Image (cartoon, rainbow, N blue to C red):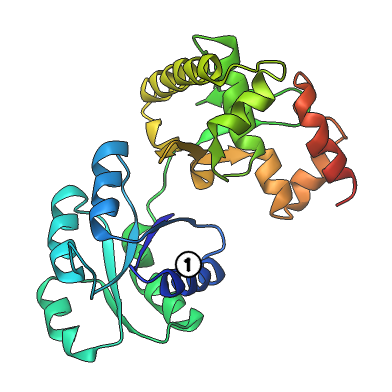
Amino acid sequence: MLIFAIDDEPKSLSILHRAIAEAAPQAQIMDFPLGTEAVRAIEAQGLSPDVVFSDIEMPELDGLALAVRLKQVSPDSKIVFVTAYSEYAVDAIRHRISGYILKPIQKSRILEELEYIAPAVAQPQEKLTVRCFGQFDVFWKGSPLMFGRKQTKELLAYLVDRNGAVCTAEEIAAVLWESETNMHVAKRRIRQLISDLKTTLAGIGMEDVLVRRSGQLAILRDRVDCDFFHMLDHDMDALNAYRGEYMSQYSWAELTVARLRFR
């Protein structure tokens, strides 16, 4: 599940993010200080958030105007208003908002809203199959996924290794080309690999696995069926399947092997 959290107050946004993370620990959460930035992310990156938790009183595009705009660019997204002012409830209903939460935000209220709208968003989704134990391999509907460049697969491997966390160009360059000192050259290579990865994923209709924002790169964890992710989530079958080998073709993966050894 992809969830947007929107609030122009940094402290309130942090509280909102934490409450959502506690209520939905498996969700991918993206924070935005402005509704306009959330709309741009949907339009530019092709994102389709399942749920949007948004403050109402915001500059540029307030919550009510944002609701109208979101219904235009992402009609299936469910919107939940988060505000300190109960008089907005009538407008929330008029704009067919899915939910309404009064501040201070509590995990229990977030959970109630997610449980209420879950039947509408919990549609089965096909996932990219990734195997990290032993060598790193990627499959689509049972067949190996082919990449245009060898290092495109390695880039995807690193994004998987980061467990959904965002990566900067500098971090990617340090892993893929340890001896490269010219960041201009490295960033050009990264752009080529990202382009190849986007093309490969788009070819199977899974381009939303990849998330780009403000020069950073990540994958949507819940769009990937991965033995490594299952193990981190304490799945016993995955834990029993691990034999000490992890992405064995990549030397940088030895750091993760060491961390897993001490889990």
Q: Residue at x 40, y 41 (%)?
A: 213
Side of 19 where 261 appears, left or right: right
Which residue does the numbered mark 1 point to in the structure image? 17
Q: Indicate whether 150 appears above or below 252.
A: above
Q: Position of residue 56 (x, y in %)?
A: 23, 74
Label total for image: 1
Determine the image quadrant of residue 162: top right
Side of 195 where 137 appears, left or right: right
Q: Secondary structure at mark 1?
A: helix
Task: Using the rendered image of the protein, determine whether residue 130 is visible from the camera's viewpoint.
Answer: no
Q: Residue at x 27, y 37 (%)?
A: 44
Q: Residue at x 18, y 48 (%)?
A: 73
Q: Position of residue 185 (x, y in %)?
A: 53, 14
Q: Residue at x 40, y 58 (%)?
A: 3
Q: Position of residue 197 (x, y in %)?
A: 46, 21
Task: Using the rendered image of the protein, determine whether residue 45 is visible from the camera's viewpoint.
Answer: yes
Location of the N terminus by quadrant is bottom left
In this rendered view, identify the residue nearer to me: 33 or 46.
33
Q: Position of residue 17 (x, y in %)?
A: 47, 67
Q: Residues within 10 Å of mark 1 (few under 14, many from 20)?
A: many
